[in-house]
Amino acid sequence: MKAVSREKQLRTVVEALDLDALILMSPENFAYGTGLHIITVSMIRPRQAFLIIPRNGEPEMVLCSIEVSLARQEGWVEKITPYTEFVDHPMDMLAGRLRELGLASGKLGMDNDYFPLSSYERFRELLPDANLVNTTESVAAVRAVKAPDEVAFIEKGTRATHRAILDAMTASKSGDTEKDMCLKIATGMLANGGDGTAFLCFASGDRTPMAHAMATDRVPQPGEIIRFDVGAVYGAYSSDFARTYSAGSPTDLQKQTYSALVRSQKAVIEAVVPAMAAEDLYYLTRDAFEKNGLPFRQAHIGHSFGVELHESPMLRPGEKTKLVPGMVLNIEPSVYDEFGVKYHTEDLLEVTETGFRLMTLGFAPEELPVIGQIITA
Amino acid sequence: MKAVSREKQLRTVVEALDLDALILMSPENFAYGTGLHIITVSMIRPRQAFLIIPRNGEPEMVLCSIEVSLARQEGWVEKITPYTEFVDHPMDMLAGRLRELGLASGKLGMDNDYFPLSSYERFRELLPDANLVNTTESVAAVRAVKAPDEVAFIEKGTRATHRAILDAMTASKSGDTEKDMCLKIATGMLANGGDGTAFLCFASGDRTPMAHAMATDRVPQPGEIIRFDVGAVYGAYSSDFARTYSAGSPTDLQKQTYSALVRSQKAVIEAVVPAMAAEDLYYLTRDAFEKNGLPFRQAHIGHSFGVELHESPMLRPGEKTKLVPGMVLNIEPSVYDEFGVKYHTEDLLEVTETGFRLMTLGFAPEELPVIGQIITA
């Protein structure tokens, strides 16, 4: 997506905590704050990148020189202090820049849930008088409410992924391996605009209980369940989507288990309204499972979604955060049948002023779909 | 790849530093130590996972319960302490387990280059008497020398990626967009056994200087350079490969610049022998560039490769580590011509007893290849 300034949103953290500067360094916070999708910030961790938002002054970056041309071309932050990898230590450059800004003894918001200990120790020696505050949660709270352009961008990716999945599973047939089917999904996601695959979990039969198993050369047999949870990369964002299919000749137990799951998921999604607590969706799922005769044993039933796969608020017990319009949530209940086979569906929604808006192409079909079948979402 | 025990290699760190236990927690160290490819360990950072290797006792893991079935199915570490996400804090579980092992005041090796500050603070309160030692570099040094099965696994992926690239660029034609060509590469990598795409950097013309730009809808024009640096996921490993092509009708300057780059790269690779220092390869590249009339301005000219994209030793000034057989290195010089266009080739090799062994299908062609051309590696 086109790099967009989130300065205004992030300055609310500066104000609320009375910071002299907010420093973003985790890959997700850096991407959010700068709008930049620089893959090495997450893939080559020592090549650290920082966005500094001083209370009094323009936002600026400290960045490895190798990434500066990309940042200038695609970003909105104009002021960049480049460092040379292996010559300058990123922490020295950050501390030096903060000192130049007169912030050596300032109150600084830091991503302490990311800040690596050895980096912290070096930084601490350089700026012993700085007052460091952990702003991980505050920034996460800001990120939780998406801007309209963010919602639109995520939605476009989600729908492209959903389309690829529907087409891939319709094109799949008896005798295909897990890998064959997963390849159809992956190539479809890429052909539909994905910048890469984010993750491809795909399993059948007795492999379904493994939460994040990769596809194998196993051929799903008639009477077996196929379950996948996949996502494509779209700039700094991705998609996250799960569906369950039958490899053919589903049993009554399978059909009933699946339909009960989808009914439960739909009931929970349709209950979404602003001002309810995130944990309410967890308990609603537990209740829906009970009503539909399903055993319930999830630690969470979904999560917020943004530059990070699992964001705050998580849909889990104890999460009291109130839903507000602009939050984007994945609702993903799952269930095991009496043979230990796992079923799972996952859809994305936006919380609106009056309720919710589905961001996928549509709900999962209420009847267990069979590979090869045409599903109209 | 089949999960393989690296216990023996890792115990050399326990011995050398006289540790009571070595604890691995960075995604790459966890993957290396356990042989497990659990995507959430890197993708959902709060879902921390730990491998504990006690001096006196069997290796064991602390792991989120949702990942236990995968770990039992595919891993070699039998002893697992599962925790329930959002109910148990991973740090409490790690500290608790270390206490049970009688290690509360032990000398513990930790990944301090990864250990998040807020996790450290929690851990420190729970085990105030533990003597924590930063073992990031020691573990990296162990990982630097690959086991034969690791070399074979990486080589298989690298060759599959190279094959996909050769086919994709032969299938590319004038009028294709950057995205069209990149999609051919990506789908080829997936069809050739990739578990996903790791990264897809693809640029043409005046976009080539951006180190890690994604493909766009731009149509490379005759007379323009195309440069890409891509990798696929293979289990816990990946591939990393760069090539430069012409979109057609290359200028003499382009042909000369490219050939000089490839000659330089080849000269450096052919100079690889055990016992030379990693930094020697950097200076050899600088010298080869000078000999071939190219300007030189790289911070490094390559890197070790393993479960992490850039591993130790890096091929940079100041890196005195001696090359030893079993090291796996990417050699990736790059150069800018007088119009600022960037050329880049990257190949993988294994250091052997007598020199090197190329792990890609072959060197880059010495003459600048044009899209559509059949290249025999």
Image (cartoon, coloured by chain):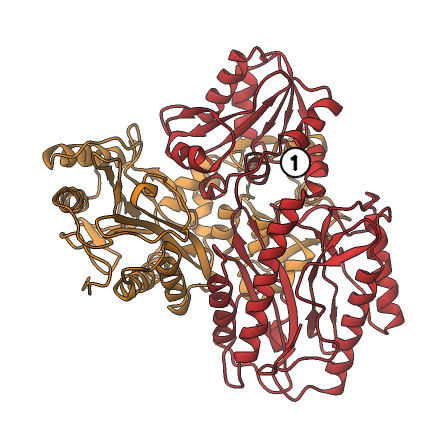
Chain colours: A red, B orange
User: Between B253 and A102, which is closer to the camera in this rendering?
Assistant: B253
Q: Is residue B16 visible?
A: no
* A234 sits left or right of A354 in the view: left
* A107 sits left or right of B340 in the view: right
Helix, strand or loop at label 1? It is helix
Neighbours of disc 1 within 10 Å: few (<14), some (14-19), many (20+) = many
Badge 1 amino acid:
Ser
* A282 sits left or right of B296 in the view: right
Q: Please report, as a chain letter, where disc 1 is located.
A: B
Q: Is residue A106 visible?
A: yes
Residue B199 screen position, x and y as percent: 43, 51
B364 up-or-down from A128: above or below: below
- The residue located at (53%, 52%) in the rendering is A234
Residue position marked by numbered label 1 in the rendering: B119
Within the image, what quadrant is residue B188 found in?
bottom left
B219 up-or-down from A170: above or below: above
- The residue located at (36%, 40%) in the rendering is B211
Residue A20 screen position, x and y as percent: 65, 17
Considering the image in quadrants, where does the C terminus of chain A appear?
Answer: bottom right
* A68 sits left or right of A117 in the view: left
Residue B150 screen position, x and y as percent: 37, 57
A374 up-or-down from B38: above or below: below
Number of numbered tags placed on the structure image: 1
